[in-house]
Image (cartoon, rainbow, N blue to C red):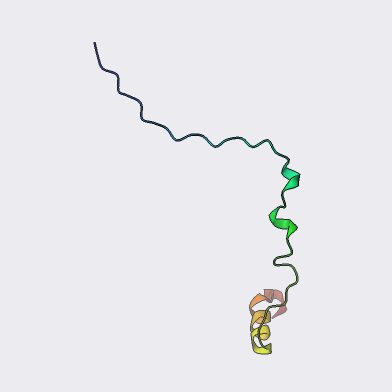
Amino acid sequence: MSETPTPEPREPKAALVFDDPLSRPSADDTDHGWGERPTGDSAADLARFLDEKPPHHI
């Protein structure tokens, strides 16, 4: 008889989670990145303005 190779142990699959997805806050629910003033001086503000200015505003 031929020998069959023993199967390699597999990692378990990720378990399905059936909890309420609306009970957890999403990344959009936080205020991080919305309207915060960057700390810095006016030279840094001017540099940021010039870096982020659209090309049609040159």
Please state the horizontal and vertical placement of residue 35, each as a whole percent of the image.
Answer: 75, 71
Tell me which residue sits at (74%, 57%) in the image: 29
Please say if 16 is above or below 35. above
Tell me which residue sits at (73%, 40%) in the image: 20
Identity of the residue furthest to the left in this view = 1
**Nearer to me, 46 or 37:** 37
- On screen, residue 2 versus residue 10, left or right, reads left
Please say if 22 is above or below 5. below
Tell me which residue sits at (72%, 49%) in the image: 24
**Nearer to me, 8 or 49:** 8
User: Disc count in the image?
Assistant: 0
Please say if 10 is above or below 2. below
- On screen, residue 6 versus residue 32, left or right, reads left
Image quadrant where one finds the C terminus:
bottom right
Image quadrant where one finds the N terminus:
top left
**Nearer to me, 3 or 18:** 18
Tell me which residue sits at (48%, 34%) in the image: 12
Please state the horizontal and vertical placement of residue 47, each as a whole percent of the image.
Answer: 64, 83
Please state the horizontal and vertical placement of residue 36, each as a whole percent of the image.
Answer: 73, 73
Please say if 52 is above or below 2. below
Quadrant in which residue 4 is drawn: top left
Quadrant in which residue 21 is drawn: top right
Please state the horizontal and vertical placement of residue 13, each as a whole percent of the image.
Answer: 51, 34
